Image (cartoon, rainbow, N blue to C red):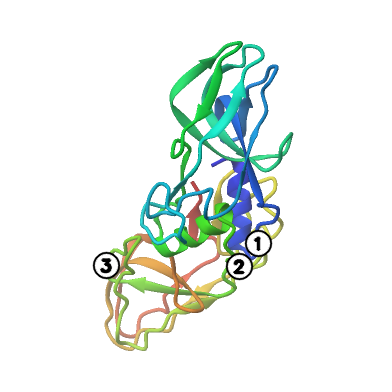
Amino acid sequence: MTDFGRNKLADYFRGSDFTGLESWWMALASAADIDGITELSGAGYARQEIVTSLANFAGTQGAASTLPSSGSSHATSNNNPVDFGTAGAAWGTASYVGFMDAETDGNCWFWVPIAVPVVINNTDEFAMPAGAIQLVLGITGGLSNFFSNKLIDRMFRAQPYSPPAAWEIGYTTNAPTNSTPGTEPGSGSYVRAEFAPDFTTLSSTVEPGDTGASDAGTTGLISNNVEIVWPVPTANQGNVTHFQVFDGSGGYLFWRAFDTPKTMSTGGLAPRFDPGTMEFLLT
């Protein structure tokens, strides 16, 4: 994922929905990094359009699937061949495919390597077979299967899913997984902390505490701008190791390990995230 793509995803988490994702334009590149791609050029070269739909991008349950995502791979891929046609001049070495948001110019959100780079010379024909352009979503800690499926279907498969307007944040006594939330305390007045993610409460990728758009960010990191507090334990709750986040309807979104596990004891201080300490790194 490029900085541009990470910033768009960060601001989605902050309540700003994606716009203009009716199509992705596939671009061939000789090099790629966090800033974008070095695109090939030459007579006959043009980006190739894939309209976002269930038919054109696979669900996470497997290549060529056309139903809404229900799998655990966090991956999507092209369901149909992508034909770049015949080169009218030497284009160079195709080592990567970039996901661009416009037919010309525009921005690169993601890129994926081509398994075996190909030198494209004059009169060569070049096409990517179905399933060859595979993209995987993730964040440090863990992105749940539920949320990954929703994001992939929103970004690539034209399925509506608005940014969750409310988060419920819990802490756990064991490690969550992408498929299964961790175990939260069942005693001691425990309840999840409520959090409303927006540009005020959740930082941009520019720096901790920033409340502007993430346009200029280069860190891929977002964190809480406000304190998040749970009730003071009224009974021992055990050793807590992770936290996990749900939407307001109980949909499981993501999880992360605490930097330092903590024992929650009767009458101890109220558990909390100070500003800037609940961090997520977009990858």
Q: Earlier in the sequence, mark 1 or mark 3?
A: 1
Mark number displayed over residue 17: 1
Q: Residue at x 46, y 63 (%)?
A: 147
Q: Secondary structure at mark 2?
A: loop
Q: Residues within 10 Å of mark 1 (few under 14, many from 20)?
A: some
Q: Which residue is mark 2?
A: 162
In three-dimensional space, the C-alpha distance between marks 1 and 2, rounded to whole angstroms, equals 6 Å
From the top left corner, tell me how far across and down residue 226 is, in percent.
59, 69
**Callout 1 touching callout 3 (CB < 8 Å):** no
Left or right placement of residue 192 versus residue 127 in this view = left
Q: Amino acid at mark 3?
A: Asn
Q: Earlier in the sequence, mark 1 or mark 2?
A: 1
Decide: is 108 above or below 237: above
- From the image, state whether disc 2 or disc 3 is nearer to you: 2
Q: Residues within 10 Å of mark 2 (few under 14, many from 20)?
A: some
From the top left corner, tell me how far across and down residue 17 is, in percent.
65, 61
From the top left corner, tell me how far across and down residue 162 is, in percent.
60, 67
Left or right placement of residue 150 versus residue 52 in this view = left
Q: Secondary structure at mark 1?
A: loop
From the top left corner, tell me how far across and down residue 221 is, in percent.
54, 51
Q: Secondary structure at mark 3?
A: loop
> Between 266 and 231, which is closer to the camera in this rendering?
231
- The answer to whether residue 176 is visible is yes
Q: Amino acid at mark 1?
A: Asp
Q: Which residue is mark 3?
A: 174
Quarter of the figure with the N terminus: top right
**Callout 1 touching callout 2 (CB < 8 Å):** yes
**Residue at the right extreme of this rendering:** 105
